[in-house]
Amino acid sequence: MSFRILKQPRKPQPTQSEQLLSIKGSSTHKASKPKRNSSIELLRLFSMLLIVAFHFVVMSTDTDWLNNQPLSLTKIIYQAVLMGGGWIGNFIFFTISTWFLLNKNQRLKDNLRRIWLLERELLFWSLGLLITYSVLNNRHIISLVIGKKYWVKSLLPLTKDLWWYPTSYALYILLLPFLIEGVKALGFKCHKQLAIIALILWGLAGFIPNVNFDIDRQSVSVFIYWFILLSYYRWYMKPLTSKQCWLLILVGIGINLVYYLIFEIFRQLTGHAYGYSVHLFTHWSLTTMMIGFGLFLLSLYHPCYNTFINIVARSSFGIYLISAHPLTEQLINYYLPLKPLYLGNYPAVMATICILGIFLFCLIIDLLRQMLFRITVDRRPGAIFDKLYGVISTRLMVGRNNQKK
């Protein structure tokens, strides 16, 4: 696989998908706003399905029990397939949002506005789910342990890290204008050296279990690491071909499977290396990035437009917020425990049905949230933020002028 390098950043030009979709709508005035590539939006939905499957296995109280089971086809499906896609989904979700921001002018105001709009959805689901679960719990319709900490976290979901991804992403978006300016100032040579060091420290060394060089599995540091690599490819490297993308995907899957089988067999023969077989599936490994990036580029290279897909894909993040809420996970653990599924008839089929059911249920609920937002807060999205930002900016400017006088 050969990679061609550009020593100067590529000029911000539309991608193949952006060009095609803008041409399709060029006959109307509405086309001034680029249409979303439905291939990318479908990939967004797929990435969320992978994340739901990952949580279904990892967040189960039976995960340790599953690790101790003998190697079988069912165990391979549960861990290498269902569990193995979680961080691929995380990387795809991050790449989709970051890719289209890298060649745009980044202003702090715009990114603060993005965080403001993100917080609305977080508050809706943090409070909405907590209140709903509390009412159902009090009427003994469901059985959950709802502590006082959930009320505090639900009032401040971004600050209190109710969900790790939104908190880390908000911090990343806040830093993004400065990250872009700083990395661009490094130039081609230094950026290349930085990308190589990052790949060695957290890519190659990441294959060693329990080695993370101070990057937590769930933190903004992961996003900054990904940003360094994505921005280098976006600005300096010639695009990979479709064949190279497929090779990237297949090599990543192959390494994952071989790595898993080697440590599983070693554990069963020796009784050591407990949990090492799933190491690549539980964090930002190089293989998950290879698979995710290959899938993203293929979607980018094959654009299409479908209104239905684009509308449904807007609920991708809502699916995550609902399914990954701590109380939802508690509910799933209680009513859909992993152990009986695994020991029952057709365990792979039953697990798949449960995952698809959770995914579709959360999707339908968030589509209803979309409708509610459309007739309320989305009539003028960000209007309150714009007023507050204007007032604060004006007062700061007046204060500076008074100091000068």
Image (cartoon, rainbow, N blue to C red):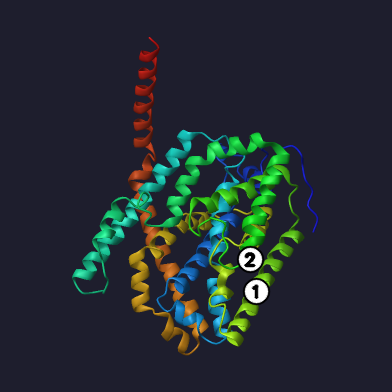
Label 1 vs label 2: CA separation? 9 Å
Q: Amino acid at mark 1?
A: Tyr
Q: Position of residue 137 (x, y in %)?
A: 23, 70
| Disc 2 packing (10 Å; few <14; some 14–19; many ≥20) | some
Q: Position of residue 307 (x, y in %)?
A: 52, 54
Nearer-the-camera pick, 227 or 118 = 227
Is 216 above or below relative to 348?
above
> Left or right: 362 with respect to 74?
left
Count of labels in the image:
2
Mark 1 touching mark 2, by CB under 8 A? yes
Q: Residue at x 34, y 22 (%)?
A: 395
Q: Amino acid at mark 2?
A: Phe
Residue 209 falls in image quadrant: bottom right
Q: Position of residue 213 (x, y in %)?
A: 57, 57
Nearer-the-camera pick, 157 or 386 = 157
Residue 33 falls in image quadrant: top right
| Residue 147 badge | none
Is 10 above or below relative to 226?
above
Q: Position of residue 233 (x, y in %)?
A: 69, 48
The answer to whether any part of residue 11 appears in the image is no
Q: Secondary structure at mark 2?
A: helix
Quadrant showing the N terminus: bottom right
Q: Residue at x 48, y 90 (%)?
A: 345
Nearer-the-camera pick, 19 or 175 = 175
Q: Residue at x 45, y 42 (%)?
A: 114
Quadrant showing the C terminus: top left
Residue under label 1:
259
Say which label, 1 or 2, has the lower sequence index.
2
Residue under label 2:
207
